[in-house]
Amino acid sequence: MTGPWLGVVADDVTGACDLAGGVAAAGVTTSVHLGVPGDDERAEDDCVVVALKTRTVAATDAVRESAAAAGWLRDRGAARIYQKYCSTFDSTDRGNIGPVADALAAEGRITLGTPATPAAGRTQYLGHLFVGDRLLSESPMRDHPLTPMRDSDLVAVLSRQTPSPVVLLPLPAVRAGAGALAREIEARAESGARHLLVDAIDDGDLDVLAAAADEVRVPLVLGGGAGVALALARRRSTGAAPSAQVLPAGGARLVLSGSASERTRQQVAAFPGPVLRLDPVALSRDGLDGLVARLRDVVTAAGEDPVLVSATAQPALVRAAQAALGVERAAELVESALGRLAVAGVRELGVRRLLVAGGETSGAVTSALGLRRLAVGTLAAPGVPWTTGRATAVPGSPEVALLLKSGNFGGPDLFRTAWETAP
Ligand code: ADP
């Protein structure tokens, strides 16, 4: 049996789903494993994604887990390894994109890629990342609770995270065509470059990059946002429709929002149903029991109508909570509360469909539910597929449908419209 065509190491679960949803929509069979799979687990699909929660952990932990995930994929014959990070390059000067890239590019490999994902409004020009019509540093990402992005120059950002040489391949090198770009990549690798960031402002640029990657004669690890992977999938596509998703229909519905992004704030504001507010300062004082009891009442009253539990707040409120509790403690309180509410919902309240907003938040919720592997299905919005998996932390391991959404993703109405595409 041949191994996967693409083996992806993703630094968070919503990023993994973003990539997986797009690749699956191109007709390539795709699954997402949550955490480094065990030795006895098989890689069954053409594209196999290992979703880690390494975006904001200590760099040494991120490196260890990413190397283990890549090793698992290589052992199963993955033809190519892909480092998936956020299309807004979420990281700090301590990492983790650089240290992980160094680890995956061990043994003389180079990394090649870009966060550019034009369909999501992320473009890279002269090494600078744009979010829509704004520089990254002027986008709402400058106020992210864990990875505030205040420098748009990605060569500079990445160079602070790795001792290895980082080089830009500017747009004219891409527009010269795949053959010329492949020779340029080889020349840069020859002269010592280790990490190559490539400008791309439309999907055609990413198609050139994907074609060049197939031609290059130096061993490489591809990387970036979902954009590069989607370009690879377009080359791979058989034209087959993605396999239809089955199960589970029905059951109570819960939206858990732990993202503080501007887009998620709009989605929370537009949610038409009942809302339970979750505040880390109150949580640290009062504990979670009262909230579990209120969730029980609200879900019971709502029947199958969606209920929202939200920690989402204005940046000033997030900063106040962080000042009172510390950044990590505030995040930990919110994440573990949402994880425990998800478990209570599935175990006691018949919740079978969950929409989770936030990358870190989704990692906390999937891990609390004991999900190990997600089958990837229909897109509810670009970058946001419905998935299904077994909640092994709940007695009977019920099958649940999950929509795991990165903070910035989906239209303002997603919390209402997503259900229309639900299995
Ligand atoms: P996104 O996908 O938007 O980056 P994440 O879930 O990855 O969302 O990150 C948001 C982080 O902010 C989480 O760690 C979450 O626990 C934390 N957070 C959410 N709401 C609050 C709040 N009100 N106060 C402090 N931290 C918060």
Image: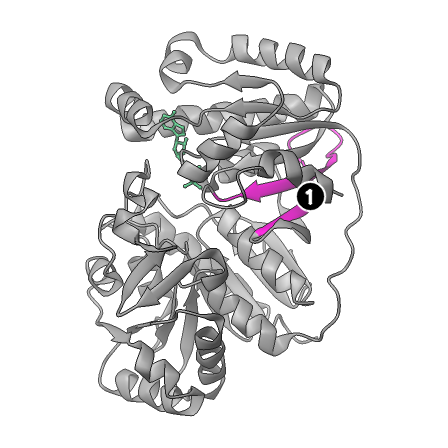
Per the image, label 1 sits on a secondary structure element best described as strand
Where is residue 186? Give x, y as percent: 33, 87
Q: What range is drawn magenta here? A: 384-406
| Structure colour scheme | one colour
Q: Quadrant of the C terminus?
A: top right
Residue 272 picture quarter = top right
From this view, report whether residue 420 is shown above or below residue 100: above
> In the rendered image, is residue 43 in sight?
no
Q: Which residue is at the front of the view, 61 or 243?
A: 243
- On the image, which quarter does residue 249 sit in? top right
In the picture, measured across the screen, residue 422 lies left or right of residue 112, that is right
The spot of residue 33 in percent (x, y) is 59, 52
Report the side of 227 relative to 161 (left or right).
right
For the N terminus, give its image quadrant: bottom right
Residue at x 32%, y 87% (from the top left corner) = 184
Q: Is residue 128 magenta?
A: no
Could you tell me which residue is drawn at 52 percent across and 67 percent down?
A: 229
Q: Is residue 400 magenta?
A: yes
Does mark 1's beta carbon lie closer than 8 Å to ligand 1? no
Q: At 46% from the left edge and 19% from the top edge, which residue is drawn?
A: 278
Residue at the outermost front position: 133
Secondary structure character of the magenta stretch overall: strand
Horizontal and vertical percent position of residue 411: 54, 43
Is residue 244 among the parts visible in the rendering?
yes
Residue at 44 percent across and 87 percent down: it is 178
Crowd tier of the residue under label 1, counting other residues whose Cα lies within 10 Å: few below 14, some 14–19, many 20 or above: many
Taking the image in four quarters, ligand 1 sits in the one at top left
Q: Position of residue 284 (x, y in %)?
A: 38, 14
Instruction: Identify the residue position indicated by label 1 in the image.
Output: 389
* 25 versus 396 height, above or below: below
Q: Nearer the viewer, residue 266 or 369?
A: 266
Q: Amino acid at mark 1?
A: Gly
